[in-house]
Amino acid sequence: QVQLVESGGGLVQPGGSLRLSCAASGSIFVISTMGWYRQAPGKQRELVAAITRGGSTNYADSVKGRFTISRDNAKNTVYLQMNSLKPEDTAVYYCNADFISGRTLEIDNYWGQGTQVTVSS
């Protein structure tokens, strides 16, 4: 089956930077949209950023200008460069992908297991 594996989370000071990576593997024909979501304690999961295969991006207002989403289609990998991090960015970050299955040629969706990002002094 398809697997999304996130990496790059950790503990950083306010104003610091992190780059998250999410690599997709398995029976994939093509990935359409990939995105990053986050869930802070006591809050609902929210969309942080998304990117289409063609490179069109969408950001939450709270991260616009600070975060940059990108992808490498050849590697089936999406990245989230996070700069000027704030304590409010503390959350578990999840990778998500819409894709066409290489096995069935049907639309499917998968979530990664999440990676913790903590911004604190």
Image (cartoon, rainbow, N blue to C red):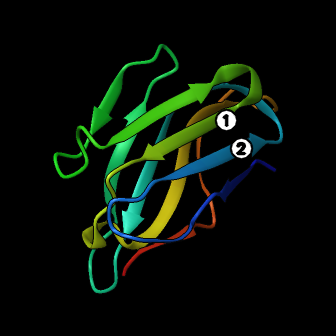
Residue occupying the point 32% across, 53% down = 84
Secondary element at tag 1: strand
Residue 108 is drawn in which quadrant?
top right
Residue occupying the point 56% across, 40% down = 79
The residue singled out by tag 2 in the image is 23
Residue occupying the point 80% across, 42% down = 25
Q: Relative to 42, is 89 above or below?
A: above
Q: What x and y, as percent, mark residue 71?
A: 57, 28
Q: Earlier in the sequence, mark 1 or mark 2?
A: 2
Q: Relative to 10, is 2 above or below?
A: above
Q: Which kind of residue does numbered mark 1 sit on?
A: Thr
Along the line of sight, the residue nearer the viewer: 88 or 77: 88
In the rendered structure, find residue 77 and report the number of the disc placed on it.
Answer: 1
Secondary element at tag 2: strand
Q: Examine the rendering and report whether any part of residue 116 can be seen.
A: yes
Q: How many marks?
A: 2
Q: Which kind of residue does numbered mark 2 sit on?
A: Ala
Cα separation, mark 1 vs mark 2, equals: 4 Å
- Tags 1 and 2 touching, CB below 8 Å: yes
Along the line of sight, the residue nearer the viewer: 61 or 107: 61
Residue 113 is drawn in which quadrant?
bottom right
Q: Relative to 109, is 74 above or below?
A: above
Q: What x and y, as percent, mark residue 22?
A: 64, 47
Q: What x and y, as percent, mark residue 37?
A: 41, 56
